Image (spheres, rainbow, N blue to C red):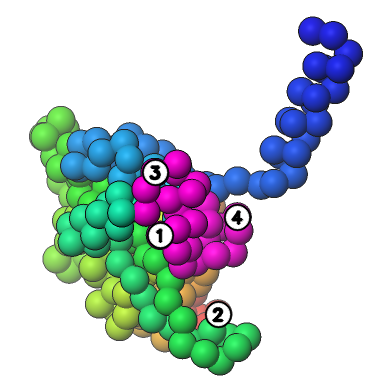
């Protein structure tokens, strides 16, 4: 490679790094074809994620998406319609904090929910001899984990909140039992936020708390330190 090509190459790499990127949970890439998404539909969802995370545009127009993907705007419209019809994508109304105006944004938490349901089903099929699931009084299946959070929070979860819950299970390796019990502790403390729940989970992890009984015994520390 000559000097000119090398300079062009290095400048291109530097520019690409400087532009930032988008974080996509591995679960979404592992499961998208298994849950009925085509390559085009998955790419469209990832483009929507890119607009929101890297470009601060939570509601790109069909024309912008069509230009990005190199297809006709009618195809984008058909893809969006199918994704919303099948529950992979929805549109949220909200009040913009800066302008005070009502705005819209895409919400792809449905994709995460369907991917989590696929993972839960796969685990049940491939690990029938695993230990019994933990009960939180009465344990909810993994496929209903998001629904439990939404019921306790009294609202729909945002895509980023769904991603945080998925990361607790996939990256931090917390059991669903522990996550649900941490949610219960947050409800008891009157602090319904994922940040507070994350603090509980980190504290339990440091103290080698691995199940609901151990968490129950350790929970007094949080109750005593509650503001």
Along the line of sight, the residue nearer the viewer: 205 or 109: 109
Going from the N terminus, do you reach mark 1 or mark 2 first?
A: 1
Q: In which quarter of the image is residue 124?
A: top left
Label 4 belongs to which residue? 54
On the image, the x and y values in percent for residue 69 come to: 45, 43
Label 1 belongs to which residue? 62
Q: Nearer the viewer, mark 4 or mark 1?
A: 1
Residue at point 52% right, 52% down?
A: 50
Along the line of sight, the residue nearer the viewer: 167 or 93: 93
Query: Label 3 neighbourhood size at 10 Å, few (<14), some (14-19), many (20+)?
Result: few
Is 183 on the left or on the right of 144, as rendered? right
Q: Where's the N terminus, which quadrant?
A: top right
Label 3 belongs to which residue? 71
Label 2 belongs to which residue? 225
Q: Does the magenta stretch include residue 66?
A: yes
Mark 2–mark 3 distance (CA, rounded to whole Å):
56 Å
> CB of mark 2 within 8 Å of CB of mark 3?
no
On the image, the x and y values in percent for residue 45 come to: 38, 50
Q: Is mark 4 on a helix, strand or loop?
A: helix
Q: Is residue 129 magenta?
A: no
Q: What stretch is highlighted in magenta?
A: 49-73
Secondary structure character of the magenta stretch overall: helix
The correct choice, above or below, for 179 with respect to 21 in the image is: below
């Amino acid at each position: 490679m000559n000097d000119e090509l090398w300079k062009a190459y290095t400048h291109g790499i530097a520019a690409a790094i400087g532009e930032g990127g988008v974080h996509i949970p591995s679960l979404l890439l592992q499961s998208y074809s298994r849950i009925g998404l085509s390559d085009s539909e998955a790419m469209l969802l990832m483009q929507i994620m890119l607009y929101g995370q890297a470009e601060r545009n939570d509601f790109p127009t069909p024309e912008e998406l069509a230009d990005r993907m190199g297809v006709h705007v009618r195809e984008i419209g058909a893809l969006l319609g199918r994704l919303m019809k099948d529950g992979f994508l929805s549109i949220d109304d909200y009040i913009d904090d800066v302008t005070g105006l009502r705005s819209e944004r895409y919400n792809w938490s449905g994709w995460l929910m369907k991917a989590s349901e696929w993972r839960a089903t796969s685990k049940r099929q491939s690990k029938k001899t695993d230990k019994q699931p933990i009960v939180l009084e009465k344990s909810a299946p993994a496929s209903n984990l998001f629904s439990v959070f939404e019921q306790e929070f009294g609202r729909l979860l945002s895509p980023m909140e769904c991603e945080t819950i998925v990361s607790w299970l996939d990256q931090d390796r917390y059991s669903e039992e522990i996550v649900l019990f941490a949610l219960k502790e947050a409800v008891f403390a009157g602090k319904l936020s994922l940040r507070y729940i994350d603090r509980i989970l980190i504290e339990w992890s440091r103290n080698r708390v691995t199940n609901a009984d151990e968490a129950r015994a350790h929970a007094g520390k949080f109750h005593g330190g509650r503001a």
